[in-house]
Image (tube, helix red, strand yellow):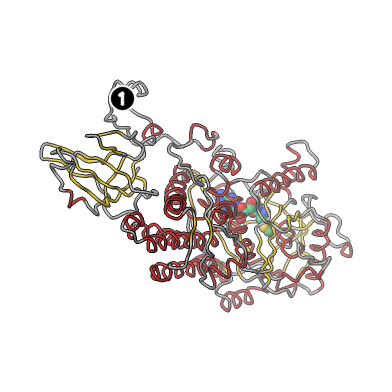
Amino acid sequence: MKNYITTPIYYVNGEAHIGHAYTTFIADTLARYSRLVGNDTYFLTGTDEHGQKIEEAAKKLNKPTQQFADEISATFRNLWDEFDISYDQFIRTTDADHKIGVQAAFAKMYENGDIYKDFYEGNYCVSCETFFPESQLMDGGCCPDCGRATSIVKEESYFFRLSKYERPLLEYYEAHPEFILPKSRRNEVISFVRGGLTDLSVTRTSFSWGVHLPETLNEPKHVMYVWLDALMNYATALGYGTDEAKMAFWPANVQLVGKDILRFHAIYWPAFLMSLGLPLPKHIAAHGWWTRDGEKMSKSKGNVVDPREVSNHYGVENFRYFMMREVPFGQDGDFSQRALIDRMNSDLSNDLGNLLNRIIGMSEKYSDFNVDSKDVAQYHAKELSDAHESLKAAENYLFELQPHRYLEELWRVFTIGNKAIEEHAPWVKIKEGRNDEALATVALVANLLAKASVLLHPVMPQTTTKIADALGFEITTDSYNALIKNGALLNPFTIKKIPPLFPRIEEPLMAEAPKAMIEEAPKAEPKPAMVDKKETTLSEEGLITIDQFFQTSIKIGTVLDAEEVPKSSKLLKLQVDLGEETPRQIVAGIREYYSAQSMIGTQVCVVANLKPAKLMGLLSEGMILAAKDADGLSLVRPEKPRLSGSSVG
Ligand code: MSP
């Protein structure tokens, strides 16, 4: 199957920010998934370089417009290369072939009567390159989109008969409910079109930085309206007007856009295509906007988040994961370092990273790194079928353009693995001599990791390649078919011991972060900390910083076993599962309040990065949190059960 995927082409009036990175990450994920499942895939991105806005930006810097466009376009391309974006083509609207293609399209629309010449007079916003009717202007005649002042422009113009396509468009939306995604956005577009479409001015004489009209029209003063020029990139990239043999990938399966440019893609674009007699794309999918601390990002506010800085700090794949997982597709999202770190620590380090480390550790101890799936189906049929249900659901979510749900389902598979280890406690089975069962659990989890990693590959290509390497297989269309489609298990293999893939970030990296990423101070009044005033690192008022607080790692632990410490009236010896390879031994002074029996199976909060100490000659590898007052002592526990190893903070 052929699969053509596009991003919008980015304006070259400024460098890329996280909004641009977001669209590109999602499109890259779709393209990688498409290749993984064996589709013949073509992924297009590029830059939008014409128009008054660009002409003016270049003038301000005293640069020839083409040179300015070359420089900024290169920054986008370089960034995508640094981010390993797997585009097949990077188109520029200043490419010669593109210009020829746009002229061919214009000529065709003119010939079939869809373009005619007239005059245009209206309120024009230079920044948005759009005319607005009086009724839409804000106070003082400002642009309803960007708030800047508009000016009255009267000029000779060619018009596209958009009004003619009002009915055909409404009929098309009706017959193709999946054309505009998500569905909530579809309704917006339909009501806009129902409100009536007026013909669209598609040429300008007020500036010259654009594609000229076909020579046959002999109109040297006119250049093409940027949106006609820009939208056509999706067709000219495939050879429209120059090499139609390349049009094999037409039409696009998914065209990703931000919600701000949906109208252009869901109304003008299909109308242009209808006029040209070309089939329409299958989906136009609109995502929401990223804000910074709840505010729109803008250079003037100085709150633009630079994607390169984020990637340098946290790794591009963690960044990709965060953006796709954090915000439901279509909704707006707020970027904060704290949210990114939380996702990295809880999802990547705790759930995925620990699971891999535990499997490596257990297989080292119990079977000299050898893993064999032979008994998995016998002992773990239920876990396997649950995992396959999630993998299937994940793929369906991706078809529906819900990458956050896709990831949620993959994480369910890791949870199944973590739970299986807790419930089947292979270390106990080994002690009891039930080696086959213990090794079957280890092999089950290795298989779950392998399967979920195959589907995580499009989101985190390099990380999952490392996981696959540790698990002795390669992520390819063949392994996708075997492990996901056919439900096969891994052949016997030897695990490779690799260093942890997701070291925890115990403290926010804020101090090292670029200025634009420094979080605002918390609004609430800080409370005095309950710490020893003699600590030299404390501030004078006895307060600690958030960095200092996060130096303490508090985790949820599940008590697997508990016994009284002989000759002690106060101490219990506990075996506590913290989601690590083996349980920790913790000696706690709670015997006066809790019996050993009542502790088994309960969950507690554990200070996990305390230096080990000896109590009554017994090693204690952590401290359990409890609250004490005159009436007694009670343990601090999660309100609802949480996975062992979940972080508290
Ligand atoms: N050049 C036009 C697109 C032409 S496509 C034929 C354009 N360029 S843009 O550079 O301004 O924006 C490109 C994409 O980035 C749009 O999809 C837009 O929604 C997206 N974003 C720009 N700022 C954004 C955020 N703050 N958050 C999320 N995406 C945002 O429009």
- Please indicate whether residue 410 sits to the left or right of residue 178 in the image: left
- Which percent across, then down, holds residue 561? 25, 51
- Please indicate whether residue 32 sits to the left or right of residue 374 in the image: right
- Which percent across, then down, holds residue 502? 49, 46
- Please indicate whether residue 406 sits to the left or right of residue 143 in the image: left
Q: Which residue is mark 1?
A: 542
- Which percent across, then down, holds residue 59? 76, 39
The residue at 43%/68% (across/down) is 375
Of 352 and 334, the residue lying toward us: 352
The residue at 28%/45% (across/down) is 605
- Which percent across, then down, holds residue 454? 55, 61
Of 250 and 567, the residue lying toward us: 567
Of 73 and 142, the residue lying toward us: 73
The residue at 52%/52% (across/down) is 323
Q: Is ligand 1 within 8 Å of the beta carbon of the residue shown at mark 1?
A: no
Can the viewer see residue 144?
Answer: no
Q: Residues within 10 Å of mark 1 (few under 14, many from 20)?
A: some
